[in-house]
Image (cartoon, helix red, strand yellow):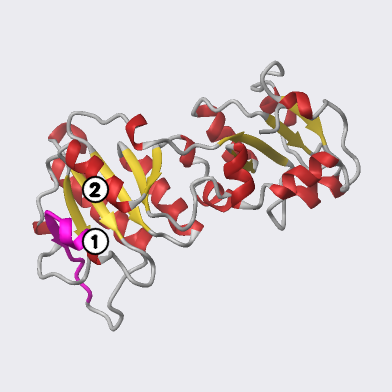
């Protein structure tokens, strides 16, 4: 893993600077996983990561485009984070965005092992099986954060939690919601150990999602974009939940389906106090 000591504090002006080449290399999943890091780009995303207690290993900012630089830099501990000022041309080389706003940080990968997750007394967990599109994972994380879920687990993942596009699509909530990743068999075993009912969202059932009991400890499982939940999950499900479809298409976007079922769980669990 590259440490802050490996990247000396200096002004970066050239797009061929080794620091910029390193940032470009982190676009590869294998490199990110080998180094245990990911990229947070954007002022809003970085602010939320800082709110969640994330301490960047490296912070790169472009004075020419970074807004309110002083207020954000004041939140950075230079003893922990190596800060570098970057020219506009060099920053655009490192950026993942077409219109960068001048902020980019390297942080520890947010993913945890299953045994590192902590559950509340009546947990609600979202399991995402083999999701391919980072945008969908990011959208589900935003739902999970808004709904106060205990965790989001990627089962047999395709897209990884450290994908910079997941971080971007999640608006930084990947650092505010506990996330884990493991093969499906391990996830099922973990859910059984913690006595969570497995509720699969699928069109292949007659049970409407509003009639499925989500008041107890539950794991809501959604499947891959094109194929839905696999037979492996259907075989272990305690319940299946169907969203009514009145149009010509037979499925909703996976992130939309997850949001609907998650909020149905909140509705079922709501007390009068919650509704005020």
What percent of the width, then of the height, locates residue 82? 74, 25
Q: Write the residue at 88% across / 47% down.
A: 16
Pointer 2 residue: 188
Residue at horizontal 67 percent and vertical 47 percent from the top = 26
Specify the quadrant that holds the C terminus. top left
Q: In terms of image quadrants, where is residue 252?
A: bottom left
Q: Residues within 10 Å of mark 1 (few under 14, many from 20)?
A: few
**Residue that carries the numbered disc 1 in the rendered image:** 232
SS for tag 2?
helix
Residue 192 visible in the snapshot = yes
Q: Which residues are magenta?
A: 232-245
- Dividing the picture into quarters, in which one does residue 227 lie? bottom left
Give the residue furthest to the right.
14
Q: Position of residue 99 (x, y in %)?
A: 72, 55
* 145 sits to left or right of 36: left
x then y, percent, for residue 158: 46, 58
Q: Check if residue 239 falls in the magenta segment.
A: yes
Res 112 quadrant in image: top left
Question: Are the residues tagged 1 and 2 within 8 Å (C-beta)?
Answer: yes
């Amino acid at each position: 893993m590259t440490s802050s000591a490996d990247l000396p504090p200096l002004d970066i002006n050239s797009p061929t600077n080794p620091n910029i080449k390193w940032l470009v290399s982190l676009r590869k999943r294998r490199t990110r996983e080998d180094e245990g890091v990911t990229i947070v780009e954007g002022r809003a995303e970085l602010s939320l990561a800082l709110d969640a207690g994330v301490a960047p290993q490296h912070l790169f900012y472009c004075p020419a485009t970074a807004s309110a630089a002083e207020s954000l830099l004041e939140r950075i501990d230079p003893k922990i984070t190596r800060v570098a000022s970057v020219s506009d041309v060099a920053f655009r080389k490192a950026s993942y965005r077409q219109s960068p706003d001048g902020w980019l940080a390297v942080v520890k990968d947010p993913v945890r092992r299953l045994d590192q997750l902590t559950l509340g007394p009546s947990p609600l967990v979202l399991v995402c099986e083999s999701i391919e599109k980072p945008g969908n994972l990011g959208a589900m994380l935003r739902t999970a954060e808004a709904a106060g879920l205990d965790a989001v687990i990627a089962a047999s993942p395709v897209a990884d939690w450290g994908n910079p596009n997941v971080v971007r699509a999640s608006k930084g909530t990947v650092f505010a919601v506990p996330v884990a990743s493991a093969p499906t068999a391990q996830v099922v075993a973990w859910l059984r150990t913690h006595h969570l009912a497995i509720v699969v969202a699928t069109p292949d059932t007659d049970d409407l999602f509003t009639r499925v009991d989500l008041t107890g400890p539950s794991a809501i499982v959604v499947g891959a974009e094109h194929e839905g939940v696999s037979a492996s999950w259907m075989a272990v499900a305690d319940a299946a939940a169907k969203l009514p479809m009145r149009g010509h298409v037979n499925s909703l976007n996976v992130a939309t389906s997850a949001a609907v079922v998650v909020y149905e769980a909140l509705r079922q669990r709501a007390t009068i106090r919650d509704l005020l």
